[in-house]
Amino acid sequence: MKRILILVLAFLSVVIVSAQQAPQFSQNMFNKLANNPGFAGSRGVIATSVLHRSQYMGFGEGGSAISTQNFSVDAEIPFLNGGVGLNIVKDQISQFSNLGLQASYAYRTELGIGQLGLGISAGMYQSGTDGGFRPATADDPAIPAGVVSGSALDLGAGAYFNTQDVYIGISSAHLSQPVVEWSDGQQYALKRHYFLIAGYYYEINPVLSLNPSIYLKNAPGVSQLDVNANLIYNNKMWGGVSYRLDEGLILLAGMNINDDLRFGIGYDVTMVNSLGDSFEVMLGYNFKIKRNNTISKYKNPRFL
């Protein structure tokens, strides 16, 4: 445990946390596959998740400056010695639209009292605009005149380690820094991103548990750090708060409707600008995998 904390602190010390980058998720502790392919298959079930985020509500004609949807599914595949996953993210930022599709594979192996997943992802990143701009100067070559789009191959990699009570993951997206060539000849370049996630599940008493976690993402010149804490009642309901450095607070709440169905919400209270608050809703469902062998003791509890 001490080695894990030292690694986390060392990683935090080499980046300067400044502003956010999209796509952004406040319920990141329930959405690990979105950034780390090493997570695929770690829960021993077929896990699905759907998430919608409206960022900076009240800003812009559509009621939100940024709208993001995310769908993910992953499953353990024993004969592949690991797990597979699929993650789809759609991002609408004013007149710009981005779509990312990533298929993942993670090789899983026992490591000490836990399990380690080493994952890779491959897919495509599509970007474009609907052309609804009103430039101050006509025929500005830097502004697309109409509908344009393009796509490029996108790769990622990650490592994810967990025990019954602790998890830590390090990953990277846009590894090859792909360049999307738009149909009008302009280019949209993606920068390599790095992610660090870590969390701990602590049982206070038979009905109350605490789940603190951190989420760090970094790209050239832009970083974001979330420090989270959820209080869990009877493994059924949770409420918590996150602090996003240099931006504001996030209120979290949710419940396990039954053993397989989960619902959660997040509300971002922005404190450093007047762009507006943000709202996020998440729905998850797990399909059980029937097998004869005993589930290993280090499989994740439902909140990790």
Image (cartoon, rainbow, N blue to C red):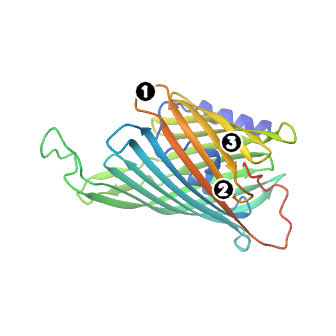
Task: State the SS at label 3.
Answer: strand
Quick one: label 2, few (<14), some, or many (20+) residues within 10 Å?
Answer: many
Q: Amino acid at mark 2?
A: Phe
Q: Residue furthest left?
A: 138
Q: Which residue is mark 2?
A: 39
Give the label on residue 198, or none: 3
- Which quarter of the figure has residue 201? top right
Q: Which residue is mark 1?
A: 273
Q: How many neighbours does mark 1 have within 10 angstroms: few (below 14), some (14-19), or many (20 or more)?
A: few
Whether residue 49 is visible, yes or no, is yes
Tell me the distance, in whole angstroms, between the alpha carbons under discs 2 and 3: 12 Å
First-in-chain label (2 vs 3): 2
- The answer to which of 70 and 107 lies nearer the viewer is 70
- Please identify, in this view, whether the residue under mark 1 or under mark 2 is nearer the observer: 1
Q: What amino acid does circle 3 point to? A: Ala
Image quarter (top left, top right, bottom left or bottom right) of the N terminus: top right
